[in-house]
Image (spheres, rainbow, N blue to C red):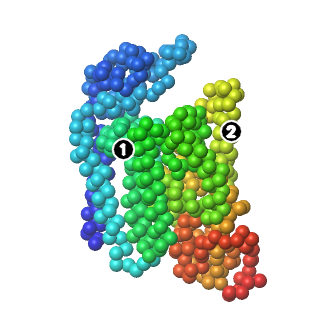
Amino acid sequence: MKAIQKVGLGLFLMALLFFNALLFLGEYQLTEAKLQEVSSEQNYTVLRTELKPMLGKTYGSSFAFVSDFNKYFDAYNTRQQENEQWDRVIWDDYTFAATKAASEGIVKENRGVWLLLTVILGTAGALLYILPLYRNETAGIKHDGIMFSSNKARGVIGITLGVYLILLYVVLYWFPAYIVNWTLLVDPLSRFLSGGPASQWFLYGTIYTLAILVMGIRMFRKYRGNKYQTLRTSSVMFFQLSFAFLLPEILVLLNKPWHDFKNIWPLDYTFFFDYRVESMVSSGTIGMFMFVWGILLIILGVPLMTYFYGKRWYCSWVCGCGGLAETAGDPYRHLSDKSLKAWSIERIMVHSVLVFAVVMTLVTIANYFSGFALLGQATGVLHQWYGFLIGAAFAGVVGVGFYPLMGNRMWCRFGCPLAAYLGIVQRFKSRFRITTNGGQCISCGNCSTYCEMGIDVRWYAQRGQNIVRASCVGCGVCASVCPRGVLKLENGPEQTRITDIPILVGNESF
């Protein structure tokens, strides 16, 4: 089995090498026909004039092509701005679309081959490595040697992986023109599902979903015999594949707005933006259902479900962010900071983001109903800053890029506004708690070590106190790794949730 795993790892690394090499392959040539295809009618004449030195010229890499495109494009906009000709400034960004249209050569002409050598080969290699895991071991969670792993203990491999993920997110969010060759690989899939070409977001969704599915299989192997872990892993795999990936693309194919039915405001912070509301309202019955469904989730779904089941119903069973954290991020859950200082920072940050999201939404709604007389178009600036700081930098770059550095729930713990909303309900008005049998606790610390939310579970277990924390996502791993069965996830009467038992002697307390 070790030999099979080595082969699988080798195939995965080879596929990753090919995947990265794609960025430097192919040629790029922009013609008038291609430019007209990607630009609007009103901007085509200007772009054709400004980009004339590029038309018909062959570039050996996307880097050279993008550099020239931005040079001529920015020069035109700068002249208009200096002359205060604001109506002539081209606000649309055509860099990605133009670069993709200009792509030709070895990558575009052999997309099937490259898809086989990268995505398919990488998936096969990962599965060959994962499936033999824990084959000859008894059921139960194994963490042997985890702190000696260069990948899982902030070693060279872990740091390298973290840096790679951070760079990947930076390019995805702010420099997508450099990864057009990657989007070409999934173009056929995009056209099949939605009828249109793949964007960088479709590429991201494909990789994201694939990561959850493959690493979900790893979770099945690692937690086999544990019904709770198996069910919740199956749940996040299902919701990501169906609700977050397939269904939204099929809606686009049917000429309906792209919509993730499981995404809830304020995590889905654009839900009340004017273009989203108008898009849903103008899309007939389905669009109105999207709008009403989203509002019902906010004012009824979240409070009711959290009251009965705690925030685990969403954060550990439905959410895509949580799905990636629980599958791809599982090897790094022990890296979360358990200090009181981290807890203090967490409470300030996550609730500050929630306040920011609420204020931004209220201002947006008020400005819309006032005919944009309140702030004019300044709300767009507010949206951009929130999207940049929270939606991109925090949720993406830090939230996933820091998995191997600071644990798998950085975004959920410190930045997710929906987690903050759910947490407030869970803390003060919920039936959910983790009960403890302090008399059986041997203070091994497994529960605290593997709590991805940085909760010192052992502190509660030693005192026999129920664990009632706003940040707890109910993943159940603390109960799974306890060798004595001290911890149990329960939904019970509110009156007995919060306990205060300061001293324990055996099974007796006073």
User: Residue 97, how many percent across, how many down?
Assistant: 38, 30
Q: Is residue 374 visible?
A: yes
For marks 2 and 1 on the same chain, the one whose residue lies earlier in the sequence: 1
Which residue is labeled 2 in the image?
A: 362
Which residue is labeled 1 in the image?
A: 193
The quarter holding residue 272 reads: top right
Foreground of the two, 414 or 311:
311
- Indicate left or right for 181 with 496 as reference: left
* SS of the residue under disc 2: helix
Foreground of the two, 149 or 380:
380
The quarter holding residue 479 reads: bottom right
Q: Residue furthest right?
A: 510
Residue 503, numbered circle: none
- Indicate left or right for 184 with 263 as reference: left
Task: Decide: few, some or many residues near mark 1? Use Cα within 10 Å; few <14, some 14-19, many ≥20.
Answer: some
The quarter holding residue 129 reads: bottom left
Mark in front: 2 vs 1: 1
Residue 25 sits above or below residue 247 on the image: above
Quarter holding the C terminus? bottom right
* SS of the residue under disc 1: helix
What kind of residue is marked 1?
Leu
What kind of residue is marked 2?
Leu
Q: Is residue 417 visible?
A: no
Q: Residue at x 56, y 82 (%)?
A: 484
User: Residue 343, how many percent across, how many down?
Assistant: 65, 59
User: Residue 49, how many percent across, how many down?
Assistant: 37, 14
User: Residue 322, how many percent across, how many down?
Assistant: 52, 57
